[in-house]
């Protein structure tokens, strides 16, 4: 299914290490790698600049605990999930993260309809969530 990103992990190639040597090939499509990388970048933005990012997406952080929660959720969770996909390197890992992004997209679309809030932030959120989710799910 298109281009594939492949990397190899292996043991030492020195003579005498034949029994300890192992080679694992992990393959993921380029779109899935891009989706995981986008998750990491989004997480880094939330971790490093929580106040700025929260303003852009229309959230108010009520003090230091709010900043910590934002860093953990919009930072650490996204970084951890994206890194896990790259480290595991499987299409199934990409599918799980893609399903999470698409779940966020579906909930936001429902919110736009039910809450009648088609703000530019919500529309941008829909586009980002659909795009990253599609990269991960369709690129697997």
Image: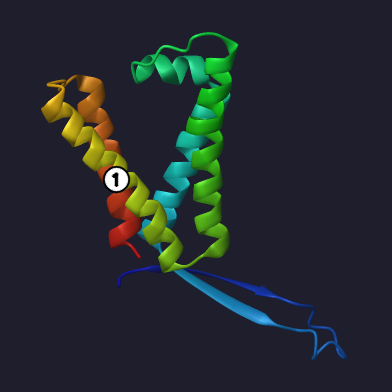
> Where residue 121 appears, x then y in whole percent?
26, 22
Which residue is at 47% across, 12% downward? 61
Position of the C terminus by quadrant? bottom left
Helix, strand or loop under label 1: helix
Which residue is at 54% across, 42% downward? 79
Q: Is residue 49 above or below residue 26?
A: above
Left or right of 88, for residue 122? left
Left or right of 57, for residue 17? right
Left or right of 47, for residue 108? left
Q: Nearer the viewer, residue 8 or 106?
A: 106
Position of the N terminus by quadrant? bottom left
Q: Is residue 66 above or below residue 132?
A: above
Q: How is the image coloured?
A: rainbow
Q: Which residue ends up furthest to the front in the rendered image?
A: 114
Which residue is at 39% across, 50% downward? 35
Residue carrying label 1: 103
Mark 1 is surrounded, within 10 Å at the Cα level, by few (under 14), some (14 to 19) or many (20 or more) other residues, namely some
Q: Quadrant of residue 57?
A: top left
- Number of numbered markers: 1
Q: Nearer the viewer, residue 74 or 8?
A: 74
> Where residue 73 appears, x then y in whole percent?
50, 32
> Where residue 3 appears, x then y in whole percent?
36, 68
Q: Which residue ends up furthest to the top in the rendered image?
A: 63
């Amino acid at each position: 299914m298109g281009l594939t990103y492949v990397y190899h992990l292996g043991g030492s190639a020195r003579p005498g290490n034949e029994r300890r040597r192992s080679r694992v090939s992990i393959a993921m499509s380029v779109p899935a790698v891009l989706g995981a990388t986008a998750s990491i970048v989004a997480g880094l933005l939330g971790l490093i600049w929580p106040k700025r990012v929260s303003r852009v997406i229309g959230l108010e952080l009520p003090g230091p605990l709010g900043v910590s929660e934002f860093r953990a959720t919009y930072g650490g969770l996204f970084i951890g999930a994206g890194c896990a996909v790259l480290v595991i390197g499987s299409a199934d890992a990409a599918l799980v993260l893609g399903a999470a992004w698409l779940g966020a997209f579906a909930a936001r679309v429902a919110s736009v309809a039910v809450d009648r809030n088609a703000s530019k932030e919500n529309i941008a959120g829909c586009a980002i969530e659909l795009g990253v989710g599609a990269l991960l799910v369709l690129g697997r």
